[in-house]
Image (cartoon, grey):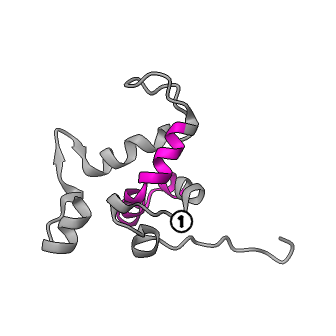
């Protein structure tokens, strides 16, 4: 929704904040459960495989969030998930919003 508002009417919902919680906070919160689900308190018996499948099917928002936030933890997650195709989350968001990965500079010996 924040990305659609920015693109269509120029409204910056990415910087909207209520009681110290921003859209960026909401975007970052679930990514930490991608690899480890033991501390997830809201549903019982969520396996890492279940969560990872959900992210693969519905993770298009991650590309949009990374484009705005440029956060290293989202970048790590995207390295595992790309390319993303999420019909309800923007379609081919890796192509439309993907931030290029900076290649590590290599020395003469590796």
Q: Is residue 77 magenta?
A: no
Point 39% across, 47% down: residue: 28
Secondary structure category for the residue under label 1: loop
What residue occupies the far bottom of the structure in this picture?
Answer: 108
Point 53% across, 65% down: residue: 83
Q: Is residue 13 left or right of residue 43?
A: left
Point 16% across, 38% down: residue: 19
Q: Is residue 68 left or right of residue 8?
A: right
Q: Nearer the viewer, residue 95 or 26?
A: 95
Quadrant in the picture for the C terminus? bottom right
**Mark count:** 1
- The part of the image, by quadrant, that contains residue 93 is bottom left
Residue range of the region highlighted in magenta in the rendering: 50-75
Q: Which residue is mark 1?
A: 83
- The part of the image, by quadrant, that contains residue 25 is top left
Q: Nearer the viewer, residue 101 or 46?
A: 46
- The part of the image, by quadrant, that contains residue 44 is top left
Q: Is residue 59 magenta?
A: yes
Give the x, y percent position of residue 3. Answer: 26, 64
Residue 103's place in the image compared with 61, above or below, is: below
What residue occupies the far right of the structure in this picture?
Answer: 109
Point 41% across, 23% down: residue: 41
Quadrant in the picture for the N terminus? bottom left
Within 10 angstroms of label 1, few (less than 14), some, or many (20 or more) residues?
Answer: some
Give the x, y percent position of residue 85. Answer: 45, 64
Residue 99's place in the image compared with 37, above or below, is: below
The secondary structure that most of the magenta stretch takes on is helix
Give the x, y percent position of residue 67. Answer: 39, 66
Give the x, y percent position of residue 96. Answer: 40, 75
What residue occupies the far front of the structure in this picture?
Answer: 87
Q: Is residue 4 left or right of residue 109?
A: left
């Amino acid at each position: 929704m924040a990305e659609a508002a920015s693109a269509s009417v120029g409204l910056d919902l990415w910087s909207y904040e209520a009681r110290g919680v921003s859209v960026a906070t909401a975007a970052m919160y679930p990514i930490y459960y991608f690899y480890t689900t033991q501390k997830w308190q809201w549903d019982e018996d969520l396996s890492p495989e279940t969560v990872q499948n959900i992210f693969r099917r519905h993770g298009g928002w991650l590309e949009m969030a990374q484009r705005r936030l440029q956060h290293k933890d989202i970048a790590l997650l995207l390295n595992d998930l790309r390319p993303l195709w999420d019909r309800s989350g923007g379609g081919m968001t890796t192509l439309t919003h993907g931030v290029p990965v900076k290649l590590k500079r290599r020395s003469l010996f590796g």
